[in-house]
Amino acid sequence: MAGTWHGLTHQPLFNTSTMILLTDGRIMVQEEATKHWHALTPVNGSYLNGTWSNLADMSIWRRYYASGVLKDGRVIVCGGEQSGGGGDTTICEIYDPVADSWAIIPSPPGWPTVGDAVCCVLPDGRVMIGALYPSTACAIYNPSTNTWSAAASKATSSNEETWILQPDQTILTTQCWAPYQSEKYIISSNTWQNEGALPVTLVDPVMHEIGPGMLLYNGKTIFFGAQNSGGHGKTAIYTPPALPTGVGTWVAGPDIPQVAGKTIVSNDCPATLLPNGKVLFAGAQYENNDWGSPIEFFEYDPSANTITQAPTPANNGMKLYWSRMMLLPTGEVLFSPSTNNVQLYEPDGMPLEAWRPTISSITPHGTVFFTDYYTLQGTQLNGLSQANIYGDDCYPATNYPIVKLHNAGTGHTYFARTSHFSSMGIATGGALQSCRFTVQGIPDGNYDVCVIANGIASHVMSLNITRFRKPEIIDSGVKREFEYFGKLVFEGDPWDRKDWVVDPQIVEMQQQIKSLSNAVSRLSSLIESRELPHVGKEIAGAVGIAAGGTLENGREKKSRKSSIEV
C-alpha cells in the first residue's frame, strides 16, 4: 500500500527550488533563479497548513550548487552552475538562521570553478566537495577555522556524482566518467580506493548523469540508474565490508518498471528514505541527451527487493531535473518541480523500534533565573542515513536532530531550535550523542519532548518550562523602579521588567548597605588625608606642635587640604 498526495493549504507565491530543513523545523526554500529565500513554518506541527515568510537574500542568485547544514545549525551554499557570479561560480556563503543573515566565506583556493559540485558534510562537521570535469581534485571546508584544505584526489572526476555517507565513516560513489566503476573515500586516512565494477549500467554515458543513491535501514546502499539498458532503468545494491578499508560487494537490484510501455530512468533527480523503510524516488521517460517528463514516482521496498509505482501528484508535468523533495520531521515529504505548486506525500506504515532515536537526558543550562539552552543526550540522534538525497545539484540531507515539544494541556506543538551537534555521523549505534536546543518563543508549561531524526521520532520525555517571574508584591509607598537584587550582579534588564515593585524589606536592606558603603568611603577619605574627627583634634594639635608644626585656628597647617570637611 502506497501513500497519498495533498496540496499545501497555503501555496507559495513564487516558484520554488532547493529546499533545506532548518534545525528549528522550518523549511528554507529558495525562490527559483533568484537570490531570494523563504521559510515554510509549520502551524501547530502541521506543514500541510504551514505559512510562508521571507528570509534574507544571499549575495547572488544561483542554480545547482553544493549545500549542507552545519553542526551549529547554519547553512552553507557553495558554487552554482548558473549564477549572478557567472557560470560555475566559486562564490560560497553561509546563512545564519538566528541572525537571518548571509556572510561570504573563502572559495576553495586555486579552484577556477565550483559550479554544481557534489558534496558531503563529514561526521566531524567539515564539508567536502569535488571538482568539475576534468579535474579529480577534492577540498574540505572547516567551519571552525573558516578555511579550506586539499583532500585526496579521486581516480576520476566527481562531476555529476552522488556521494553517500556510510556508517563506517566512508563515502561511497559510482563514477560518472570512464571506467564507470565505484570508489570509496576513507575519511580517517584521507584516501580514495576502488570499490569494484558495477553489475549493471547506471550512468548515461552521453550526459554523464546518474540518479540518487540511498543508504537503507538494512545497512546496504542502492543507486538508481539513468541509462536505458534493455528497455529499463537499472539499480545496483552495495553491501559494505566488515572494515572501512575492506572492499564491499555489488549486486543488481530490481529494474525500474516501465510506465505505459515507456522506459523510465532516474537522471538528476531526488529520493527520500521514508520512515517505513521504503525509498520514494522520482523518474521519467528516457530521452536521448535530455531529461524526460512527466515526472513519475516509485517506491523501493528493501524487504521484498521490489519497485512499485507510487501515486502521481498533481504538479508532475515538468522535466525531471527540476524535481526537489524534502523529508519533513513529521515523516511526510514535500515535492515541487520548481513551480509554485508544492505537494505533500503522506506515506503509509511505521518505523521499526530499532530505527528510532532515543533520549537519555535533558539538562538545562543557565542560572536560577534564566535557562540559556537545554542539552539533550541520547542515541541515534542523526538517524541511520542521510535520508534525503539528490546528488550534485543540491544536498538536502536531514541527518541531524530536530526537537519537538507538545503540550497535552493546550494541544499545541512547537519545534525548538537545535545546534551544537556532537556529530554529523549516521548510524552511531549505542554511542551517546548530544545536541543543544533553545525554547525561545515557546510558552511556559508541561511538555512531552521528542527528538526526531529523518522523520522518525523518539519516545517522549517530560519537560517543564518555567521562566523567572516578577514578584507579586505591591506597596504604594515604594517608588516603582527596577531594583531586584540581581541588578547588583548583572548589567541590563534581561527580562524587561523595569516596572517591578520590590518588597520594602529589600529596599531597607539596600539603604542600609548604601549607608555602610558611604561610611566606608568617608573613612577611606579620612585615612587618605590623615585627618581625624573633632574628638581627636586637641591631641593631634599637640602632637603636631611637638613635632615642630604650628596651629592655626585650631588646625595644623598642611601643605594640602583634606578632601572632606569634618
Image (spheres, rainbow, N blue to C red):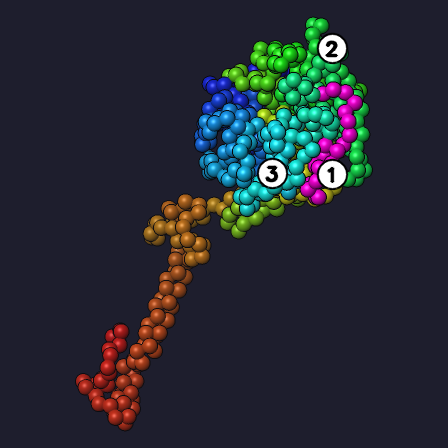
The answer to if 195 sits in the magenta stretch is: yes
Which residue lies at the image location 47% right of the left edge and 38% below the top edge?
A: 103
**Lower position in the chain sequence, tag 3 or tag 1:** 3
Mark 1: secondary structure: loop
Q: Is residue 104 left or right of residue 426?
A: left
- Residue 16, position in %: x, y? 52, 21
Mark linked to residue 231: 2
Q: Nearer the viewer, residue 30 or 360?
A: 30
Circle 2: is it few (<14), some (14-19), or many (20+) Cα within 10 Å? some
- The residue that label 1 is drawn on is 168
Q: Say what amino acid the circle numbered 3 marks.
A: Ala
Q: Nearer the viewer, residue 178 or 526?
A: 178
Question: How many angstroms separate mark 3 from mark 2 (CA)?
Answer: 39 Å
Quadrant (top left/top right/bottom left/bottom right) for the N terminus: top right
Q: Say what amino acid the circle numbered 2 marks.
A: Gly
- The residue that label 3 is drawn on is 139
Magenta region: which residues? 183-202
Circle 1: is it few (<14), some (14-19), or many (20+) Cα within 10 Å? some
Quadrant (top left/top right/bottom left/bottom right) for the C terminus: bottom left
Q: Are marks 1 and 2 in contact (CB under 8 Å)?
A: no
As drawn, the residue found furthest toward the top would be 260
Which residue lies at the image location 73% right of the left edge and 29% below the top edge?
A: 182
Which residue lies at the image location 77% right of the left edge and 18% below the top edge?
A: 254
- Residue 7, position in %: x, y? 56, 15
Mark 3: secondary structure: strand
Mark 2: secondary structure: loop
Q: Say what amino acid the circle numbered 1 marks.
A: Asp
- Residue 357, position in %: x, y? 69, 36
